[in-house]
Image: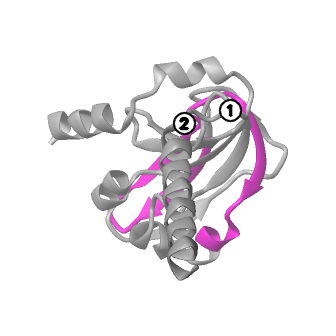
Amino acid sequence: MASATLMMRTVARRSFITALHTNASAPCVTSARCMSTYYTKAHEYIKVEGNVGTVGITDHAQSLLGDIVFVDLPEVDDEFDKGDSFGSVESVKAASDVYAPVTGTVTETNEAVTSEPGTVNSSAEDEGWFIKMEIGDESELEDLMNAEDYKAHCEAED
């Protein structure tokens, strides 16, 4: 009896592991893009999940700027076309506009970076995001770079 139970647990465990591996490699069914990250030549990123993009400056950009001392963000419901300036970043070295990587409407702003701008330096592509926006034209993502292309772009600039 004990060996039958052990055998059933082993089969169940293998089925579970197989299901995990199958689902991990399966394409996203609910949207065309499942948590994909894209980059602009101006060093903004957009992390796309469904039709919402989380936008900020890249780690490479924050390292070039140095210690960030001020971040200016738009208001929720503001609309931007691809390439429009939606905010700015000031550091001890320079000030720089931040541009919308795609057309869309702001759905959320990260107030934490306005009160603690150094968050952008410590976690640019995670906790240091600037805005979330509903993407107006998903086809504009095709004009942006993937991680590999962005890395090559940064290396060419250096």
Name the quadrant of the N terminus.
bottom right
**Three-letter amino acid code at the position of disc 1:** Val
**Three-letter amino acid code at the position of disc 2:** Ala
Which residue is label 1 attached to? 29
Considering every residue shown, the one lying at the far right of the view is 77
Q: State the mark number for residue 129.
A: none
Q: State the mark number for residue 26.
A: 2
Q: Per the image, is 4 magenta?
A: no
Residue at position x 47%, y 61% from top? 90
Up the image or down, 82 lies above or below 54; here it is above
Up the image or down, 132 lies above or below 122; here it is above
Q: Which residues are magenta?
A: 86-114
- Quadrant for residue 27, please give it: top right
Residue at position x 30%, y 60% from top? 63
Up the image or down, 50 lies above or below 110; here it is above
Residue at position x 69%, y 32% from top? 31
Going by the image, does 119 lie left or right of 42?
A: right
Going by the image, does 63 lie left or right of 70?
A: left
Q: Per the image, is 103 magenta?
A: yes
SS class, disc 2: loop
Residue at position x 79%, y 52% from top? 75
Name the quadrant of the C terminus.
top left
- Image location (x, y in percent) of residue 64: 28, 56
Of residue 52 and residue 106, the one placed in the foreground of this image is 52
SS class, disc 1: loop
The answer for how far apart the CA atoms under marks 2 and 1 are is: 8 Å
- Image location (x, y in percent) of residue 20: 53, 53
- Quadrant for residue 52, please give it: top right
Q: Neighbour class for label 2 at 10 Å: few (<14), some, many (≥20)? A: few
